[in-house]
């Protein structure tokens, strides 16, 4: 005979403390009766544009309690006390024999007031008491935590987006916990972590990074093979010169992307800053976003400059018009010196470099939902130190430093974007991790917008199930 | 029970030194570009219970897009109350634009009132000398108000005897003297009797800034730093008439005629020493009768807001960008009688220049972490090219609460001599043709009082024109509900609803018009935005209230 495990526990992890085992016929105290009232409920939910879900289900468990009246009432009281725990989370564990456990998070104050009216005696058996325990839980149940393969972001390399796992389990998007652990110190104090899930059939292969050499510098023409550099003479331009343009490969699907420019102030430059503007070109006509400035504070400073969002392949998606597929899209970046900076030092021709361009998807026609992203900004004097781990805890909705496996009491970073970060089942999920977004200082010895040391990226999630019959 | 929704935007709050990402429901936030705008308000319910007892009024609040990690709104908590069921916190916030309203300064930008000039008894070395102000009988018709300094008659005068008038507007203020402009007419054209201007401590022996002024001398282009002539960082400026040497061909006991013993200053304007956004003195000369409003905003950034407003010109556009854009330069801008907030100064500038808008941008978290000023301030002309593209049928046209037409207004102000003046203006039918159907009907607006801080004939004329531009025309406005990315006609990109901001023109396909987008409110749970389109009417009650506040002080 099948005897499912139905327990109230304090955590969805193995080894959790068991408050009440509700289905233990062997103990002859409390068990679940096979009656029509038993149901794991039907989930009701809604989903926002980023895939974040909210919803509940009503679970009814017909309990039989054996014992004298005072013993049964004491049992009901004990269960109700557990259900009414404030500021703590209680889980309902459900597991069929041979299956995997599914945990439902109880909503706060479930059970309501202790109601003796809920207790009724079975007239045929004076020591058997029946109680339909009704619970409101999250719409989904969660499975055991799944650890994804660790991967590394090599030092000095732009991360072009990493496929997290070929398959994400579950029925609905699940929060992803991410740890970033550098093999050395942190030279950056603002990161960007973004995940998007795309259709299995999509041609998308991760955030697209181009080294500057793959673009045609339009002004000026000096081009050293590693990056595009600008002489101070460009400073005379008040409207900004176009400095890069190039064709976007067809492997970048239609959608909205965040355009990041990897900029660097060169060693011989002693001051000044620049403004960037990215956009698309239709023949020779440029259209793009607003100017965004970057004011590096020292030589060699390098940062990802967030120039805003681009809609590709270009053209406006007016009602009734298809995406502009017939025009070959062209990406262009414009640049000008900051007219109010203290001036670019000397007359060196290598004042400023653009090392590359990165497109991070915000939303794509091939995406199952919009991206979820988070950008922690640490106090640069009190951020994570060497070998400490930056943890994005999507389950606990917090971002901070973990040292020695415990949350460190460093001031938590300011957070742009938000947690949870989500992974999507039945989709390919790509993660992009960047270091140093728009910082103006302080600098490291190499002033690196890329990770100065190799960074280990570990991620895990608990799959979420709306339908658990097959598990 | 409160349930988290966590829509397209995320909320972080700073409580007791720590930032907390929080789960919310019912998150809405609003930006405006009407009056002084920018991040205006926000409200949400925090469903995390961990912040109970931590979050309080004035806690920092940042709202950002989950998709792009871009900060879209910032401000501070204003009210934090438990929800009815006790499971969450209901939070209402005020936006970063109120950074402009939490501080006060005394700012004599452009002083024209004559009662600022007083007899400087410390340096009036001769008994019986006199300083008087007001309409003078021999004044030129165009500039009737003057400051008159005279030496006494019927007494023996010696070399160095003088009478001096001191401008008190800058003493104990937050500005230094930056320049002076006026016409000097002296009674006698001689080397012996001279007029002079002193800047700074005008003790005996100090060298005057200008002396040997003769009849009909215009003092122009006197800016701190110009040609190194006008001294920096002085809060005193004085006018003087002085007997330089004993007159050889006349009795030195008295000068023959009364007007031989006096000097008169007409049309006096004393400018504050302007700063740029970096706090450095602006040395640009001016000889114009007013003060450039974009220069005033630049000064406010450098003088009053340097801890909160970034000097980054991509976020706070430079005044130099608007060099040729037409704008009205107020001919009086004198906040020396009582401290004002930067918000009120900018609000006054916008009253004169309804074709400009002002917005305070959300926080930049990188600058915040570094302790740098972290907000942008845009004071700019309304664009002439549309940004938002509003498709056919998307506008819900609305009539505003007050759509009546007015053809008359009375404006009251206090002129330079301290006299209360008023003038009734009548809208010109040739200009405001919407009025034609009113026939002979007169509908008069509530009177507007400019007080003395911004009161002058020219300023009143300007305000009247501005008022008629909004009240003698039929208003037009509507709202647009946006539930998907909106085409940006300037960038060629699609803008998601949570990134939309006002301060832009919206092209309405239905009518072909370009209307101002004056407000945007975003509903994060549903990922939608509502745009308010209008050519807003100048807020008359606000003008009146401002004037009333001044009187009360």
Image (cartoon, coloured by chain):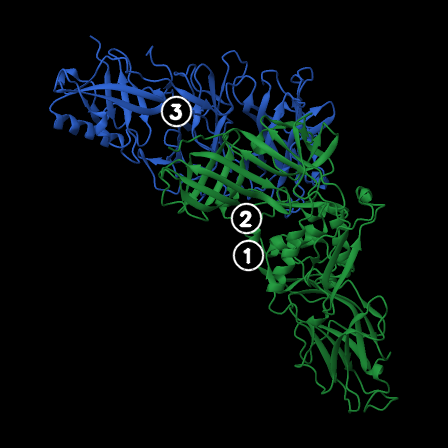
Chain colours: A blue, B green
Answer few, some or many: residues within 10 Å of disc 2's Cα (few below 14, many 20 plus, some between 14 and 19): some
Q: CA distance from mark 3 to mark 1?
A: 47 Å
- How far across and down, in percent of the image, does residue B247 sit? 84, 87
- The chain letter for the residue carrying disc 3 is A
- How far across and down, in percent of the image, does residue B151 sit? 77, 84
The outermost residue toward the top is: A1
SS type, badge 1: loop
Q: Relative to the observer, which residue lies in front, A260 or B421?
A: B421
Q: Relative to the observer, which residue lies in front, A425 or A259?
A: A425
Q: Are marks 2 and 1 in contact (CB under 8 Å)?
A: no
Q: Which residue is mark 2?
A: B373
Counting residues from the start of the chain, the first of labels 2 and 1 encountered is 1
Answer few, some or many: residues within 10 Å of disc 3's Cα (few below 14, many 20 plus, some between 14 and 19): many
Left or right, residue B63 beside residue B461:
left
Q: Are marks 3 and 2 in contact (CB under 8 Å)?
A: no
Q: Which residue is mark 3?
A: A459
Left or right, residue B80 beside residue A312:
left
Left or right, residue B362 beside residue A12:
right
Answer few, some or many: residues within 10 Å of disc 1's Cα (few below 14, many 20 plus, some between 14 and 19): some
SS type, badge 3: strand
Q: CA distance from mark 2 to mark 1?
A: 16 Å
Q: Residue at point 21% right, 12% down?
A: A3
Q: Which residue is mark 1?
A: B103
Q: CA distance from mark 3 to mark 2?
A: 36 Å
B54, above or below B330, in the image: above
- The answer to whether residue A390 is visible is yes
Same chain under badges 3 and 2? The reply is: no
């Amino acid at each position: 005979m099948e005897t499912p495990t139905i327990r109230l526990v304090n955590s969805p992890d193995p080894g959790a403390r068991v408050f009440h085992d509700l289905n233990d016929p062997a103990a002859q105290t409390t068990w679940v009766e096979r009656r029509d009232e038993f149901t794991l409920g039907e989930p009701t939910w809604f989903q926002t544009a980023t895939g974040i879900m909210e919803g509940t289900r009503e679970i009814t468990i017909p309990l039989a309690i054996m014992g004298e009246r005072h013993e049964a009432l004491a049992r009901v009281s004990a269960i109700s006390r557990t259900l009414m725990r404030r500021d703590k989370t209680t889980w309902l564990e459900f597991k069929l024999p041979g299956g995997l456990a599914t945990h439902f998070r109880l909503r706060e104050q479930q059970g309501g007031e202790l109601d003796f009216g809920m207790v009724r005696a079975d007239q045929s058996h004076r020591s058997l008491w029946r109680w339909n325990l009704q619970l409101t839980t999250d719409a989904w149940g969660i499975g055991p935590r799944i650890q994804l393969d660790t991967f590394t972001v090599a030092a000095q390399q732009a991360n072009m987006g990493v496929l997290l796992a070929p398959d994400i389990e579950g029925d609905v998007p699940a929060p992803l916990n991410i740890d970033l652990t550098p093999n050395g110190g942190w030279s950056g104090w603002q990161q960007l972590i973004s995940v998007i899930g795309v259709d299995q059939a999509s041609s998308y292969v991760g955030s697209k990074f181009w080294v500057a050499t793959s673009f045609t510098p339009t002004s000026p023409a000096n081009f050293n093979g590693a990056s595009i550099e600008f002489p101070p003479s460009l400073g005379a331009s008040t409207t900004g010169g176009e400095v890069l343009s190039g064709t976007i490969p067809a492997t970048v699907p239609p959608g909205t992307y965040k355009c990041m420019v990897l900029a660097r102030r060169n060693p011989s430059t002693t001051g000044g800053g620049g403004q960037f503007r990215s956009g698309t070109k239709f023949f020779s006509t440029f259209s793009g976003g607003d100017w965004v400035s970057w004011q590096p504070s020292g030589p060699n400073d390098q940062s990802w400059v967030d120039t805003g969002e681009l809609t590709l392949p270009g053209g406006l998606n007016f009602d009734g018009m298809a995406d502009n597929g017939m025009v070959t899209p062209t990406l262009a970046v414009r640049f000008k010196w900051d007219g109010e900076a203290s001036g670019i030092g000397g007359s060196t021709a290598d004042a400023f470099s653009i090392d590359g361009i990165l497109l991070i998807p915000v939303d794509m026609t091939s995406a199952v939902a919009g991206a979820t992203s988070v950008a922690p900004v640490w106090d640069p004097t009190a951020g994570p130190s060497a070998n400490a781990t930056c943890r994005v805890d999507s389950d606990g909705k917090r971002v901070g430093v973990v040292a020695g496996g415990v949350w460190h009491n460093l001031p938590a970073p300011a957070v742009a974007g938000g947690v949870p970060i989500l992974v999507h089942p039945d989709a390919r999920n790509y993660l992009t991790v960047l270091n140093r977004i728009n910082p103006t200082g302080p600098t490291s010895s190499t002033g690196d917008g890329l990770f100065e040391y190799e960074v280990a990226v570990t991620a895990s999630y608990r799959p979420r199930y709306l339908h658990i019959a097959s598990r | 029970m409160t349930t988290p929704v966590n829509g397209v935007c995320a909320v972080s709050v700073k409580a007791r030194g720590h930032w907390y990402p929080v789960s919310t429901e019912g998150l809405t936030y609003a930006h405006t570009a009407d009056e002084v705008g920018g991040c205006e308000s926000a409200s949400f319910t925090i469903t995390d219970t961990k912040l109970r007892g931590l979050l309080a009024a004035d806690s920092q609040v940042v709202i950002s897009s989950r998709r792009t990690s871009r900060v879209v709104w910032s401000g501070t908590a204003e009210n934090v109350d438990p929800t009815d069921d006790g499971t969450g916190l209901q939070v209402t916030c005020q936006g970063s634009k109120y950074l402009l309203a939490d501080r006060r300064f005394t700012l004599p930008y452009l002083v024209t009132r004559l009662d600022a000039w007083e007899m400087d008894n410390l340096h009036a070395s001769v008994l019986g000398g006199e300083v008087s102000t007001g309409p003078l009988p021999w004044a030129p018709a165009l500039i009737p108000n003057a400051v008159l300094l005279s030496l006494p008659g019927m007494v023996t005068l010696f070399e160095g005897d003088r009478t001096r008038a001191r401008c008190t507007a800058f003493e104990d203020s937050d500005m230094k003297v930056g320049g002076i402009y006026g016409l000097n007419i002296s009674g006698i054209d001689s080397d012996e009797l001279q007029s002079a201007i002193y800047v700074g401590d005008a003790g005996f022996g100090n060298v005057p800034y200008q002396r040997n002024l003769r009849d009909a001398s215009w003092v122009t282009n006197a800016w701190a730093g110009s040609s190194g002539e006008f001294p920096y960082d002085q809060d005193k400026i004085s006018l003087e008439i002085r007997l330089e040497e004993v007159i050889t061909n006349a009795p030195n006991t008295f000068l023959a005629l009364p007007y031989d013993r006096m000097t008169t200053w007409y049309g006096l304007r004393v400018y504050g020493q302007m700063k740029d956004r970096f706090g450095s003195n602006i040395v640009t000369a001016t000889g114009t009768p007013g003060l450039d409003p974009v220069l005033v905003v630049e000064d406010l950034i450098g003088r009053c807001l340097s801890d909160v407003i970034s000097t980054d010109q991509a976020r706070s556009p430079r005044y130099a960008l608007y060099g040729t854009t037409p704008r009205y330069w107020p001919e009086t801008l004198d906040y020396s009688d009582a401290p004002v907030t930067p918000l009120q100064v900018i609000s006054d500038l916008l009253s004169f220049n309804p074709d400009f808008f002002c917005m305070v941008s959300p926080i930049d978290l990188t600058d915040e972490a570094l302790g740098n000023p972290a907000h942008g301030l845009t004071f700019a002309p309304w664009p002439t090219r549309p940004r938002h593209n509003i498709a056919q049928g998307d506008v819900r046209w609305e009539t505003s609460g007050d759509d009546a037409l007015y053809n008359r207004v009375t404006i009251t102000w206090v002129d330079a001599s301290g006299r209360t003046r008023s003038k009734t203006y009548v809208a010109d039918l040739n200009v405001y043709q919407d009025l034609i159907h009113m026939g002979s009907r007169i509908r008069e607006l509530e009177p507007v009082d400019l007080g003395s801080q911004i009161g002058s004939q020219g300023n009143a004329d300007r305000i009247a024109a501005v008022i008629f531009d909004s009240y003698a025309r039929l208003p037009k406005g509507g709202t647009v509900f946006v539930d998907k990315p909106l085409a940006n006609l300037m960038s060629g990109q699609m803008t998601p609803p949570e990134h939309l901001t006002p301060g832009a023109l919206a092209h309405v396909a239905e009518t072909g018009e370009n209307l101002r987008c004056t407000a945007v409110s975003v509903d994060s749970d549903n990922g939608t935005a509502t745009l308010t389109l209008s050519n807003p009417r100048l807020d008359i009650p606000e003008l009146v209230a401002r004037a009333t506040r001044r009187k009360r002080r």
